[in-house]
Image (spheres, rainbow, N blue to C red):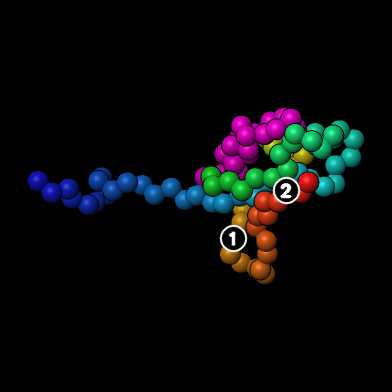
């Protein structure tokens, strides 16, 4: 018997968003990115929500620690969309 498509048989689509997480540049006092080495400074994450994006970042952190990504006191989390002007999304660069 063929599978019928209908409200009871269709898989529910989950709306995912692309998030850009970055360390905040206006930190005063305690700064999880000092000293700068062995730290993650940003992520591009596909997630259902900001909370989920922050959780994924915290699970992939460096020595800055998970709290740096879970708290908006230390990091920003913005949805990337196709509106606005052209911009660089990711640059993966190493220099010796």
On whether residue 54 falls in the magenta region, the answer is yes
Seen from this angle, which residue lies furthest front?
Answer: 96
Give the residue number, with chain letter if any, for mark 1: 81
> Which of label 1 and label 2 is nearer to you?
2
In this view of the protein, can residue 4 be seen by the observer? Answer: yes
In this view of the protein, can residue 78 be seen by the observer? Answer: no
**Image coords of residue 3 (percent x, y):** 17, 48
- Helix, strand or loop under label 2: loop
Which residue is located at x 85 percent, y 34 percent? 35
Badge 1 or badge 2: first in the primary sequence: 1
**Image coords of residue 9 (percent x, y):** 25, 46
Q: Which mark is residue 94?
A: 2
Q: Is residue 77 above or below residue 69?
A: below
On whether residue 81 falls in the magenta region, the answer is no
Labels 1 & 2 near each other (Cβ < 8 A): no
Assess disc 1: are there few (<14), some (14-19) or many (≥20) residues with their C-alpha within 10 Å of its C-alpha. few
Which residue is located at x 70 percent, y 32 percent? 62
Q: Is residue 5 above or below residue 65?
A: below
Rendered image quadrant of residue 66 = top right
- Helix, strand or loop under label 1: loop
In the displayed structure image, the side of residue 34 where residue 60 appears, left or right: left
- The span shown in magenta is 48-67
Which residue is located at x 18 percent, y 50 percent? 4
Which residue is located at x 73 percent, y 43 percent? 41
**Image coords of residue 28 (percent x, y):** 89, 40
In the displayed structure image, the side of residue 95 where residue 70 appears, left or right: left
Assess disc 2: are there few (<14), some (14-19) or many (≥20) residues with their C-alpha within 10 Å of its C-alpha. few
Report the Cα–Cα distance between label 1 and label 2: 27 Å
Seen from this angle, which residue lies furthest left?
Answer: 1
């Amino acid at each position: 018997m063929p599978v019928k498509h209908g409200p009871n048989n269709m898989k529910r689509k989950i709306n995912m968003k692309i998030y850009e997480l970055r360390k905040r540049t206006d930190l005063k006092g305690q700064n999880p990115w000092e000293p700068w080495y062995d730290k993650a400074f940003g992520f591009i994450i596909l997630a259902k929500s900001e909370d989920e994006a922050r959780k994924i970042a915290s699970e992939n952190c460096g020595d800055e620690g998970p709290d740096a990504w879970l708290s908006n006191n230390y990091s920003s989390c913005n949805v990337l969309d196709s509106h606005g002007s052209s911009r660089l999304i990711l640059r993966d660069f190493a220099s010796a």
